[in-house]
Image (cartoon, helix red, strand yellow):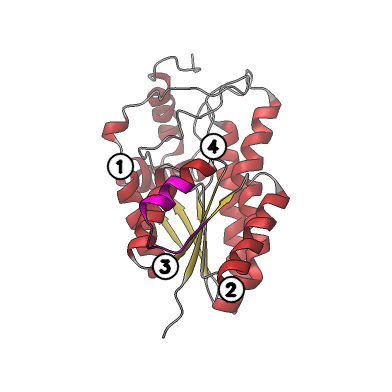
Amino acid sequence: MEQKKVVIITGASSGIGKSLAELYVSKGWRLVLAARRIDRLKEFEATHPDAEILSVKTDVSVETDCKYLIEKAIESFGQIDVLINNAGISMRATFDQVELDVLRKLMDVNYWGTVYCTKFALPHLLKQRGSVVGVISVGGYIGLPGRTGYSAAKFAVRGFLDTVRIEYLKSGLHVLVAAPGFTASEIRKHALVANGEQQGETPRDESKMMSAEECAKRIVKAIERRRRKIIINFIDGQLAVFVAKLWADLVDRALYRVFAKEPKSPLK
């Protein structure tokens, strides 16, 4: 009997992470789910009583938490076939107003969380010729105004994983960088404002965005096809990145106008 495959998903308590978990459950995989909100992970377990799921309370900004996550995955299931670095937070403040601790927090969660989990999972992924995935954002290709820390961290994740891909080119390791455009999730509600407090409400119409479920489907398909990168949405994703390469000034002005129109925008 073929051994069931194992996927680790960080930031699995809501949004894209939870949708990814739903998809992998439907495929019969064994799941290791990581998030700070362990109660939500346990609720997910309870709704899938026949699935093999390990929930681990994890703050990916803490190195020892990430090490423990990988150790528990191996202790419970003996292997890791896919690691999806999905955990992340956003922000909303201009650079002159934002406190430096907010920028550090963005980098700790979005960038260092990916580095820590990938570092500890790497030997096991190499053994399985598995996949490591970084869920970034179009903000990892184009600077988003009012989100300096967010874009910086997502650019950093892309650079990090692109380099890992080259280093292990002959090992069989698959590296995917997935960049969704605007996707309906809780990330904007929990985005940090200038003083580090959570925004509490989204400034955008979530109903007009791609669903987390559709986004997750496209990421899983890209993993299965062992693609190196995927920019998921068309207008606010692929098209924006393409146009930015040709007419950078035009895109800068367009982005400024879009984000300046948001309710209570920090842009003038």
Q: Which residue is mark 2?
A: 78
Which callout, 4 or 2, points to the residue nearer the camera? 2
Q: Residue drawn at (50%, 50%), measured in percent from left and top?
A: 86
Give the Cα distance between marks 4 and 3. 27 Å
Identity, as a three-letter code, of the amino acid under mark 3? Trp
Around disc 2, counting alpha carbons within 10 Å, would you say few (fewer than 14), some (14 to 19), or many (20 or more)? few
**Residue 113, x across and y down, in percent:** 63, 49
What is the spatial separation of the Cα atoms under label 1 and label 2, in whole angstroms? 35 Å
Q: Earlier in the sequence, mark 4 or mark 3?
A: 3
Q: Secondary structure at mark 3?
A: loop
> Which circle, 4 or 3, is nearer the viewer?
3
Nearer the N terminus, badge 1 or badge 2? Answer: 2
Disc 1 packing (10 Å; few <14; some 14–19; many ≥20): some
Q: Which mark is residue 210?
A: 1
Q: Earlier in the sequence, mark 1 or mark 4?
A: 4
| Amino acid type of the residue that numbered disc 1 sits on in the rendered structure | Met
In the rendered structure, does residue 44 fall within the stretch colored magenta? yes
Q: Residue at x 34, y 66 (%)?
A: 27
Residue situated furthest bottom in the rendering: 1
> Gap between marks 2 and 3, in whole Å?
13 Å
Q: Amino acid at mark 4?
A: Ile
Q: Residue 29: which numbered mark, if any?
A: 3
| Label 2 residue SS | loop
- Tell which of 79 and 1 is nearer to you: 1
Disc 1 to disc 4, C-alpha distance: 18 Å
Name the N-terminal-most of marks 4 and 2.
2
Circle 2/circle 3 CB separation < 8 Å = no
Residue at 39% across, 16% down: 263
Q: Residue furthest left?
A: 208
